[in-house]
Amino acid sequence: MSVPETKSAPETKSGVSVHVRGLRKSFGEHAVLKGIDLEIQAGEIFVIMGPSGSGKSIFLRHVIGLETPDGGEVLVDNIRVEDDSIRDRVRMAMVFQSGGLLNSLSVAENVGLYLAEHRIHPPKEIARVVKEKLEAVQLNDADGEKNPTELSGGMKKRVAIARALVMEPQLVLYDEPTSELDPLVAITIGREIVKLNRRVGATTVVVSHDRDLAFGIADRIAFLADGKILQVGTKEEIKSSQIPLIQEFISADFAVK
Amino acid sequence: MFREIGQMILLFTAWVRSLPLAWRHRRHLAEQLFEIGNASLFMACVLSFFIGGVLSLQAGPLLVQRGLGSMLGGLVAESMCKELGPVMMAILIAGRVGSSMAAELGSMAVSQEIDALRTLNINPVHYLILPRVLAISIVLPCLVVFSDLVGCGGGALVAAFNTDIAVGTSTFFGNLRQVLEFKDVFHGLLKSLVFATLIGLVCCHHGMVTRGGPRGVGRSVTKAVVNSIVLILITDYLLTRVLLPLNRFHS
């Protein structure tokens, strides 16, 4: 039996910067992003917070090149994200809201997919790396044999994080990582995000409307509402914001007045 | 409509360019071959048997009345190999395999699996489309060969046992051997290859561009099957127009 051709492992490099300039996107008559300008520094955890329907997820899809903007540009490590060569030069991973796991593959195959398809390691080495990454997100070998449809929402997200870890990414994007999760699992996921950021130094962009997550993990926060950035700042700056919508968003509770 | 045609042409180009990578995706290809062949062979045989039988049943008495009963074998074989085999098998595959392909890819699109592949720097055309379209293109001509054989068998059985026809199997197959030429079978296979590529590309395209949850998946499946069948019939006419003069030229 012939030994599969293998590539050398990708060169490890710390996080990359992201520059967004005048990003605009409309779907028909509806303008979703109305000119967004952002500078995300290499290696930081940057959280984009805002109410549902404010354009957060669409923004994230532009950053990784899944959407084409109507205007403006996104530069990752000073390379336009539409550039075909960007994925060969910058390792970018995204953890989708639903996990985005391939249901036709087992959990272990999902985690090792990047390595197998790009022939970065031989099968034995892939199995070892997959085991290591599953353990990093508190999953075991038995979980690796399962089909994604057998997993809970929290486990799916952890598998998606393991799949991102395998890439040793320089930029990781998380779309609502704690939605539909109970508080304990949400905290575990939040910790995983911080651990991954510290371990590989990857630039981390998180989109969420979860206030606890945002204030718990962010180095900086941007508040997005109605397709526009209202404010960018540290946790303290956002907490003491004078913008009524931001104040309302971060201080709202269940008390009936 | 023009936009969709343009997208399908681009998909076809990308698929053709990905063909050299087929060996690399042989595991997926083998899975698809098994799934498509396994799902369709029995139905293809049943369908073909009855198509051949109906051909005999319709044409047999008319030919016998005019003293041309001995020509029945050739008529059934020519109809099966040139037209009914390729077209009916293509329609069967569009309905049975194309619909499931569109539904599977549609569900993957809706649950962000295709986006996930892109973020892993895996080209969805190489990973998803290449093995599926290639598998259909291999399986459909094989099914057409089965269809031709079983259809002729069905026609011969009906011709032999129906009292209004009563054409023996030796007469039936004797005429068949006299009339049917290799090029007739080849033209049918050529048609089936074109139909297979069309079905694969149309169904994969509609699956990949699915938006809007389960309802979107349903819409994509309907569009995929209807468009495939319409395209099969239009292409059949055009191919027949091209192949008929060639047939006469060779004769």
Image (cartoon, coloured by chain):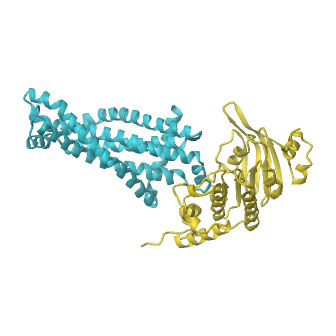
How many numbered marks appear?
0
Point out the residue furthest to the left here. Answer: B67
Residue A164 horizontal/vertical position (percent): 65, 60
Q: Is residue A185 left or right of residue B140?
A: right
Residue lying at 56% horizontally and 72% vertically, measured from the top left = A125
Q: Quadrant of residue B53?
A: top left
Q: Position of residue A105 (x, y in %)?
A: 52, 58
> What percent of the width, then of the height, locates residue B157?
15, 41
Res B30 quadrant in image: bottom left
**Quadrant location, the C terminus of chain B:** top left
Q: Is residue B249 visible?
A: no
**Camera-side residue of B234 and B161:** B161
Residue B164 x %, y %: 11, 31
Q: Residue farthest to the front?
A: A256
Chain painted cyan: B
Question: Residue at position x 40%, y 34% from top?
Answer: B231
Residue drawn at x 72%, y 34% as measured from the top left: A31
- B190 to B164, vertically: above or below: below
Residue at the image point whose x is 47% and y is 48% from the top: B15
Give the left or right position of residue B5, taking residue A60 as reference: left
Question: Is A235 situated left or right of B156 in this image?
Answer: right
Chain ID, yellow in image: A
The quarter of the picture where residue B230 lies is top left
Q: Nearer the viewer, residue A254 or B79?
A: A254
Would you say residue A100 is visible in this rendering?
yes
Q: Nearer the viewer, residue B195 or A179?
A: A179
